[in-house]
Amino acid sequence: MAYILFANPSILSAAGVPFAPAVAATAAAAAICCILMGVVANFPMALASGMGLNAVIAYQVAPAAGSWQVAMGIVVLDGVVAFALVMSGLREAVMRAIPRDLRRAIGVGIGLFIAFIGLVNAKLVIVPPGTLTTLASNPLAAMPPVTHGSLRMPEATVALVGLLITAVLIARRVTGAIVIGILASAAIALAMGVASLPTTAWVSVPSFATVGQADVMGAIRSNALPMLLPMLLVDFFDTIGTATAVADEAGLHDERGEIPGLRRLLAVDSLSAAIGGFFGASSVTSYVESAAGVAEGARTGLHTVVVGLLFATALFLTPVFSIVPPAATAPALIVVGFLMCQQIARIDFEDLEVALPAFVLLATIPFTYSISHGIGYGFITFVVIKVVSAKGRSVHPLMYAAAAGFAGYFVFG
């Protein structure tokens, strides 16, 4: 999980979050939330700022909200609302309302989105200069939105070599492949002059300049408030899927196939989202990488407390993380995107009434550069197909409500 200490500040910096405080915030929020999960839920599942959710904050919510502070306010609201839904039992109800293959498509679409961000950061994908020039004078012109980069650019070379190293390590199932790939990419970046060593001490007192800066009242008044629904959806399904995967790996289901203490687990996860927003580290969520610890024998919250303590040690290493440029973290984003896309193999493409909306959803997330629009288009497509096929009664009322809400947002938002 340590790669998030490099990747999260790199992504959030696109929204204006200062890099060094973002490193400290990422480490501190992860430490606190991991220890909470271990002590309160006694479950071997660690937490940190979520990949995908941080991209939503940086590239969608913050620009719409006008500032990263307001965007973090929306993250706090996300955590508070999710906690209320957990306590009321509605979280499980919403989970049951959305077809499983649509939930899987959300994860795949976010994976493609993250990989696309990595390719852009790597300068392996660029916007053609001719497109920028033409669109500046004629916004309605049909121009190629992106094209390939060039290995004559040192950032592209760093990212491509780093990606190949990471891919080989993952294919050979080397433990810590993503972190090793980041470190190797950083070393190449230093050799090529894309990065430089700290000019001051390598260990420093952490800066908490982002802590407490979340603007909740501004979020309530913001034009970006409709983003709260898709954030809740992503949080919902990511955590349920992660908890299920970790429990399967650990054999922690009870005789009814349920996870013991699920409500406590979900409550900590929801509060963690609010904690992440308060710290300015984006939404903190559960990590499926926890299965690595479970595979080594972890069965209790002691595992998670230890992970939290290790994250706490990173608070003092901000100068080390500042060495790593975006080109060196790009391979990690691309590989994480690949890992998230593996769920596509579990989508039933024979059931066209669900498979078509799932494809619309997972394709429009990266192509529109908007997770919320992708989810909305997928939900609307699903409801329309069911209604036209005279199977509207099989659609849960909450799906009708979500599709109608997205339609209203697209037309009037």
Image (spheres, rainbow, N blue to C red):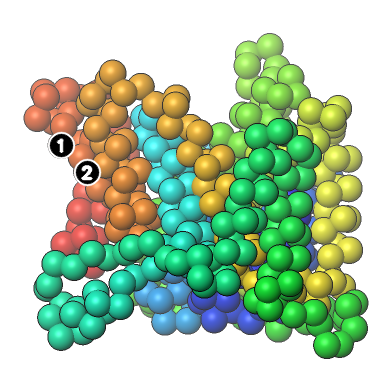
Q: Residue at x 45, y 25 (%)?
A: 346
Q: Nearer the viewer, residue 10 or 217?
A: 10
Q: Which amino acid, by three-letter code, is at mark 2?
A: Ile
Does 114 appear above or below 63?
above
Q: Which residue is mark 1?
A: 384
Q: Residue at x 82, y 44 (%)?
A: 304
Question: Mark 2 and 1 residues: CB-CB less than 8 Å, in contact?
Answer: yes
Q: Nearer the viewer, residue 39 or 331?
A: 331
State the image coordinates of residue 394 (x, y, percent, origin top left).
Answer: 24, 23
Q: Residue at x 83, y 49 (%)?
A: 307
Does 11 appear above or below 346?
below
Q: CA distance from mark 2 to mark 1?
A: 6 Å
Q: Which residue is mark 2?
A: 380
Number of numbered discs on residues? 2
Q: Nearer the viewer, residue 256 or 152?
A: 152
Q: Quadrant of residue 392?
A: top left
Q: Does 290 sit left or right of 89 as displayed?
A: right
